[in-house]
Amino acid sequence: MALFALADCNNFYASCERVFQPRLNGKPVVVLSNNDGCVIARSEEAKALGIGMGDVEFKVRAMMRTHGVQVFSSNYALYGDMSGRVMRILGDAAPHSEVYSIDECFLDFAGMTDAKAHARKVRERVKQWTGIPISIGMGSSKVLAKAANKLAKKATGGVLWITPENADEWLELLPVEKVWGVGRSLTTRLAAVGITTARGLRDVEPRWARQEMGVVGERLVLELRGLSCMEIEEVAPPKKNVVCAKGFGRLLTDRNEVEEALASYVDIAAAKVRAQGSVVGTMQVFLQTNVFREDMPQYCPHRVAVLGEATAYTPALIEHALRLLRAMWREGFAFKKVGVMLLDLRDSTQLSLFERRNNEAARLRLQAAADQLGDLVRWGSMGFDKSWRLRAERRTPRYTTRLDELPTARAA
Amino acid sequence: MSCTLIGLAVETLPLHRLPLVQARVPGGFPSPAEDYLEGTLKLDELLVKHPAATFLMRVEGDSMIGAGIHNGDLIVVDRAIEPATGKIVVAVLDGAFFVKRIVVRGDRCFLCSENPKFKDVEVGEWASLDVWGVVTNVIHALK
């Protein structure tokens, strides 16, 4: 029988900050979006103060100061690297894994004996090895695993498995708007007919769901009943970061082949980013060998690049991705997967003047001109550098990716 | 001890890509196969046993000089290794990182320095010890 586990890092960005600043333990922590505009991550203590996701910084500034909230600019170099570490550990935990976003990963637990004990071990290992706390939700469909994940923080040990026996009890606790793929308008329509919980949605007639909510709605109901029938991308494509990672049909040892795959994944991911009107600020690329082939040498590296200028221009993103791949490439390994994660997605209207001028169609013309002018254009753009740099006044050091920004251990 | 100048060292080679060339003293025609560049020595392989769990930190202070850890050195910290008595660790004290050796005497647990100028810190029971990671290597630049 199908069994999916969804591992999700708790308050990921805030947790990353805490790993390297233990003085923050127990204190409210908030991370701001690029340009320090609004709240994008909160520790449990910050949530308890009523600070909301997406709250505009200056509106909650006075309140945060009163309560001694520790406020940080986003540090995507750190988050991208810590994500790579967590995903690597998760990748070892199941024969198939699917990185869904910077802090979420599906694991295929089908056929596993004592899956719950295994999930607990995985959770402990991620916490011990990286310092990042995670929750794991399990169920026989991905929508159920996601629902279980939402509830897992309330369950003992941060692991919850929704089974046919306990589904009534747990799905009753989950408001329907928390079910994956249920948006605001659907929530309103469901409320009008008295459906407010995940359990209520599960128990509608699939035929009625099809009439009222279309094919996706019908499948959602089936998924909640434990029948796996959807690719997760169909339900809810992630918005804050975009991942494209697929296993190869066979193990690849040739760099050119891996580069081709990576370039095509970047193309897919970049199109999604453009479709939501965003540009990319940070990129992470990862490579995986097949860790279940114990007879073969293993190498699962990842690298992060903070882009000099945010872009959604595919050739530019491919260039960055290939540069990262080449920097970590080693001969002599057979790779099963390559993936790209586009992070720090910004609204393209937020772009600085220089970046906007540089974007998309204009960029094509600019690039052609730049090729002819050579160093002159590079020189000119370097001169702009500081004027269009985003605000990141409270960014912590890039503890894991810069030799000159390492954490300090006192010998005193 | 004597030294012989055999040529200039190549300074531009990145540290983590030291080429390892295998060649034998030729007895006849050299085999083309023996010119084959075998790959590179990677310091990562020596220093990093658990890549997902390994971090670098910079040392500040000289309380661990007796263990060969000097001010300004880099330490390799592996969080996958279980802390145990006798191990040098990065521990959290008052919200900051300290590099110390764990010493257990009876049911009392200490974080000890390796320099007589510094006092040991008693942390109470083992459970109240907050270990961030175990130090596996020191990278010390000779000045």
Image: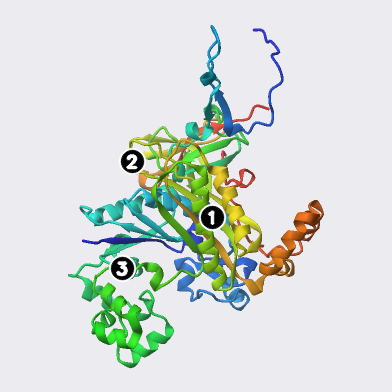
Please state which amino acid type lies under the numbered disc 3: Ala
Disc 3 secondary structure class: helix
Q: CA distance from mark 2 to mark 3?
A: 31 Å
Chain letter for mark 1: A
Among numbered discs 1 and 2, the one appearing first in the sequence? 1
The quadrant of the image that shows the C terminus of chain B is: top right
Residue B121 image point, x, y percent: 48, 40
Among numbered discs 1 and 3, the one appearing first in the sequence? 3
Disc 2 secondary structure class: loop
Q: Residue furthest bottom?
A: A192
Q: CA distance from mark 1 to mark 3?
A: 35 Å
Is residue A67 in view from this perspective? no
Q: CA distance from mark 1 to mark 2?
A: 26 Å
Query: Mark 2 — residue?
Result: A293
Q: Badges 1 and 3: C-beta atoms under 8 Å apart?
A: no
Q: Residues within 10 Å of mark 1 (few under 14, many from 20)?
A: many
Judge whether A306 appears above or below A327 on screen.
below
Q: Are marks 1 and 3 on the same chain?
A: yes
Residue A56 image point, x, y percent: 59, 76
Please state which amino acid type lies under the numbered disc 1: Ala
Residue A200 lies left or right of residue A234; in this view the side is left
The numbered disc on residue A171 is: none
Among numbered discs 2 and 3, the one appearing first in the sequence? 3
Please state which amino acid type lies under the numbered disc 2: Arg
Chain letter for mark 3: A
Q: For this rendering, which residue is in front, B105 or A46?
A: A46
Query: Mark 3 — residue?
Result: A148
Judge whether A188 appears above or below B132 on screen.
below
How is the protein colored in the picture?
rainbow
Q: For this rendering, which residue is in front, B6 or A30?
A: B6
Q: What residue appears at the point 48 percent right and 45 percent down from the top-left corner?
A: A301
